[in-house]
Amino acid sequence: MPAVNVKPGIYWIGVNDRTTDLFEGLWPITSEGVSYNAYVIDGERKVLVDAAKDIKGDALLDQIAEVFDPALLDYIVINHMEPDHTGVLRTLRRIAPNVTFLCTSRAVKMLENYYQVTDNVHAVEDGEVLDLGPHQLQFHSAPMVHWPETMLTYETTQKVLFSCDAFGGYGALQGAIFDDQCTAPEFYEREALRYYANIVALFPKPVLKAIDKLAGIPVDVVAPSHGLLWRKHPERIIELYQKWANYAIEGPELGVTLLYGTMYGNTEKMVEAVAAGVARAGMPVDIFDVRHIHASYILSSVYTCSGVLIGAPTYEGELFPPMAHVLDMLNRKRIQNRKLAYFGSFGWSGGARREIAQWAEKLKWELVESWEFPGGPTSQDLLKAEELGYTFAQSLR
Ligand code: FEO
């Protein structure tokens, strides 16, 4: 994509990544893609704000060259050290050997560890201002949004906030880079939520602290390093992040995530009956087969819903392993304080129910119902399952 003028002297020069299957080696983006948004400021001093993953080095250099010769770079602002934003730093330094890196003090050692860069590094103070004539940058440390060294950079004359991971999302850019040009904002909002739940959810308080810190700062454009740039409604993505971070503090929305796994379809028969009960209660429900759906997508739902229904059989005396994996991911992201009900089939002895109780304790979830049944469900069991779904949904109100 060509460089895009964001504000006078400020250009988006990002690149799309449609070839990586797993973001961070973990989260699927095969069909969604991701963008590594980077920016240049073309004034008396030439600045690059954030960069890209190493596999996109040539594309990023071509993008910079659309605005100025990359060899002319005076500064590279490193808001965040994760290699999706820094993978090309050594290449950039070979091209612009006198460039100065601007980062937080926490990033200095990381620069050495990742890229053996130890000279021409300036650690900025929180709130420090750098005059670039005619532009001016102000640096705001934002630890744990997403790593401890993270900062946000604010261009004061044009009111552009370069927020890096904060306010970002999965989803390659589809021609349009701004919210007001985008015909599918729901895609980017959904992918921003998935990104939040996968990448940032562990750090709700730092997110809220960073948002508080920005409260008095007028922002015309939120320019994150992944996903859409927000210039028509810059407040929209900030409010969404604030809402999502608050789920971890004040609790999520009313709703049910129904997770199931099944070996021969017996637990699955119960799923349909339980879901019918939830629907009868008028409660929204997302249903995921954990054998096929990656935890990345499940995290988004559980993150936003107050209730979790789990249907999974016993497997060799323990919980069906794909379900245990999902619960482990939820535990790693500390998605706590949900209501839980469990049902599942067993062959010769139970065991899943015991493990579910252990997971509930670990996750600080309230286990309100736990039901193991032998073999396949009877018609009486299916009636009971429908009632279980209804009662559980009602209990969330
Ligand atoms: Fe986009 Fe934490 O890296």
Image (cartoon, rainbow, N blue to C red):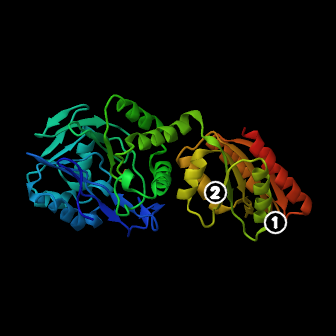
Residue at 84% x, 66% y: name it: 375
Where is residue 347? Give x, y as percent. 81, 66
Residue at 11% x, 61% y: name it: 95
Q: In this view, does 145 lie to the left or right of 159?
A: right
Q: Gap between marks 1 and 2, in whole Å? A: 18 Å
Q: Could one spot residue 368 in this view of the protein?
A: no
Q: Looking at the figure, which quarter contains the C terminus?
A: top right
Q: Tell me the element at label 1.
A: loop
Where is residue 58? Give x, y as percent. 21, 67
Q: In this view, does 85 lie to the left or right of 390?
A: left
Q: Which mark is residue 324?
A: 2
Q: Return the residue nearer the eye: 363 or 293.
A: 293
> Which quadrant holds residue 211?
top left
Q: Which mark is residue 208?
A: none
Q: Return the residue nearer the eye: 143 or 106.
A: 143
Label 1: how many Cα within 10 Å (few below 14, some 14–19, many 20+) = some
State whether residue 292 is above or below residue 194. Answer: below
State whether residue 137 is above or below residue 170. Answer: above
Q: Is residue 386 left or right of residue 30?
A: right
Q: In this view, does 81 lie to the left or right of 312?
A: left
Mark 2 close to ligand 1, CB under 8 Å = no
Where is residue 264? Give x, y as percent. 76, 71
Residue highlighted by disc 1:
347
Q: What residue type is labelled 1?
A: Gly
Q: Return the residue nearer the eye: 166 or 199.
A: 166
Q: Looking at the figure, which quarter contains the N terminus?
A: bottom left
Q: Could one spot residue 78 in this view of the protein?
A: yes
